[in-house]
Image (cartoon, rainbow, N blue to C red):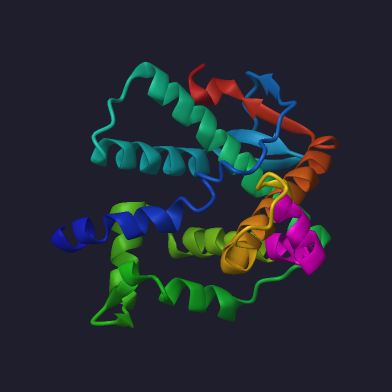
Amino acid sequence: MDWLRKNMRTIFVITIAGFVAGVFVGFGGYFFGGARVSNAIAEINGVKIPYRNYVLLFNRVMDNLRSNNVDITDEVIKRTRQDVVQDLIREEVLYQETKKYGIRVTDGEVGYDVQRFQAFQEDGRFSQQAYFRVLSWQLRMTPKEFEESRRRQIAIAKLNNLIVSSVKISNPELQVEYARKHDGQLTNFEKNRDKFFEELTQEKRTALINDWYRNINTSLKVKVFTELLGE
C-alpha cells in the first residue's frame, strides 16, 4: 500500500489522459434519452460507450479530488459526471477519426508505452508483477482494457500530430505577429524570438485543432443516456 500511495499520482495521470483537455472545444448537440442501450452510457455514430468505462473514470476522478481535499458537494459530483461523459465522448469521436485517416497502433507501440510508466517499474525496470498489481488493486482494469485504452490514446496523439504538422510560421509572419502583440514595435524581437515562436506555434495549433473539432461536431450523431447517470 505504501508503494501504491507513492505512485498514486502517476497512476492517475496514466488513466486520465485527455480528461483536462480544456483547450479543446467540446462536442455538443447531444440527444439525451432515458432508454437503456445495452448498458451503454452514450452512443456516438452508432458506436456504444460501455457504462463500465464511465464508472471507472468517474471513480478515479473522484478519488483524485478527495486526495486533493476538494469539498465533494452535489455540484462537484454533477459537474464531474458531465465532464467524464464529455471526455469519453471526445475520445470515442477522435478514435473514430483515426480510423478514417488510416492510423494504426501496433502491439509493439502499446508494449513500449506501457513499460515506460514508472508506476509499473521496480528498480528502474518494467515489472509484470507490479503491472498486474496496479491494474487489479488500483485501476480495477484488466490488462486488455488498459492496453486498449492506451492504444486509443496513442492513435489520438498521432492524429493530433498529423493535424498540427501543417502549421508553418515564416519569419516575416513571426515579425508581423510579434509587432501586432507589442503595439506595432519589434523591440527585443531577436531576444524573445524563440519563446514567441513557440507560443505562436502552440496558439495556431490549438486554433487549428479547435476548428477541425468544430467541423466534426456538425455531423456527429451523439446520444447520452441520462438514466445511467442518475439524472
For the point 62% across and 66% down, which residue is it?
193
Residue 72 sits in quarter: top left
* Horizontal side of residue 202 vs 137, given as left or right: right
Residue 190 in percent (x, y) is at 63, 68
Q: The N terminus appears in which quarter of the rendering?
A: bottom left
> Magenta region: which residues?
159-179
Image mark count: 0
Query: In the depicted view, which residue is nearer to us: 53 or 208?
Result: 208
* Horizontal side of residue 21 vs 146, given as left or right: right
For the point 79% across and 47% down, which residue is it?
212
Residue 58 in percent (x, y) is at 43, 37
Query: In the depicted view, which residue is nearer to us: 161 or 27?
Result: 161
Residue 149 sits in quarter: bottom right
Q: Can residue 96 be seen in this view?
A: no
For the point 66% across and 36% down, which residue is it?
26
Residue 13 in percent (x, y) is at 41, 55
Residue 38 in percent (x, y) is at 62, 35
Q: Is residue 184 visible?
A: yes
Q: Is residue 72 magenta?
A: no
Q: Is the magenta stretch mostly helix, strand or loop?
A: helix
Where is 121 relative to 50, above or below? below
